[in-house]
Amino acid sequence: MIDNFLSNFQDGVFHILNLNAYDHIFFLIVLAVPYLFKDWKRVFLLVSIFTLGHCVSLALTAYDVISVNVHLVEFLIPLTILIVALFNVFTAGKKSHQNKVGLLFFATLFFGLVHGLGFVGTFEKMIASSENKLIALLEIGLGIEVGQLVVVFIVMFLSFLCQTIFRFSKRDWVMVISSIVVGFVLPMLIHSPLFN
């Protein structure tokens, strides 16, 4: 029982911290870069909403409620990253990230659903030997949450260093990091299997 939990939990963490799954890391970077440590509750909520979306789409596919067009998902994932990165670029230095609950939260939930669909093939292999799909999903989901929080903490720590020690303005930091991510994501969109 504990071995299954640890295995599923590690699979969830590895899904996020795996450098081959850099699209997920890019999304977390652009999600977290506008925030400082004092905003930790808001960031934690955003990450948890993203995890929830991830887990809902995995559950829907695990129980055959929906099926996935892999090529469409492979296009939508970088598109979600691009949308958030451009949102950051155009709103850097403004108060739009400080709204109570708004478009960003609903968008994060939707983007979590999309990113979860990109994990379906791997997830199905992980739970193939599980007696209870729902328990396995919750264990993997917990690992995903912890992995995402690690990435977000690193992003926020680097933001703190660059804005306090190296004296980057918050606006410039958000714009530069988000623009770098845009530079990585555009080729992913252009070379998407949907268009080939």
Image: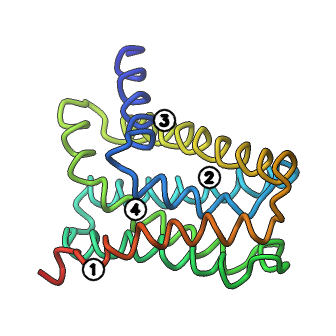
Q: CA distance from mark 3 to mark 4?
A: 15 Å
Residue 118, image x, y percentages: 30, 60
Is the residue marked by circle 3 packed among few (<14), some (14-19), or many (20+) residues within 10 Å?
many
Which residue has dot 4 on it? 115
Residue 124 x %, y %: 22, 45
Q: Residue furthest top?
A: 2
Say which residue appears at 24% left-offset and 46% top-offset.
Answer: 122
Q: CA distance from mark 3 to mark 2?
A: 12 Å
- Circle 2 or circle 4, nearest the eye: 4
Q: Earlier in the sequence, mark 3 or mark 2?
A: 2
Q: Circle 1: is it few (<14), some (14-19), or many (20+) Cα within 10 Å?
A: few
Work out whether residue 188 or residue 98 is closer to the camera in this orientation and state it. Answer: 188
Residue depicted at x 57% and y 74%: 84
- Mark 3, residue position: 143
Q: Is residue 3 above or below residue 194?
A: above
- Left or right, 55 with respect to 37, comes to left
**Residue name at image x 85 percent, y 78 percent:** 95
Gap between marks 3 and 1, in whole Å?
31 Å
Say whether marks 3 and 4 touch (CB < 8 Å). Answer: no
Judging depth in this view, the residue of 190 and 32 nearest the camera is: 190
Looking at the image, residue 59 lies above or below residue 19 = below
Residue identifier under label 1:
190
Q: Amino acid at mark 1?
A: Ile
Which amino acid is tagged 2?
Answer: Ser
Q: Which residue is mark 2?
A: 48
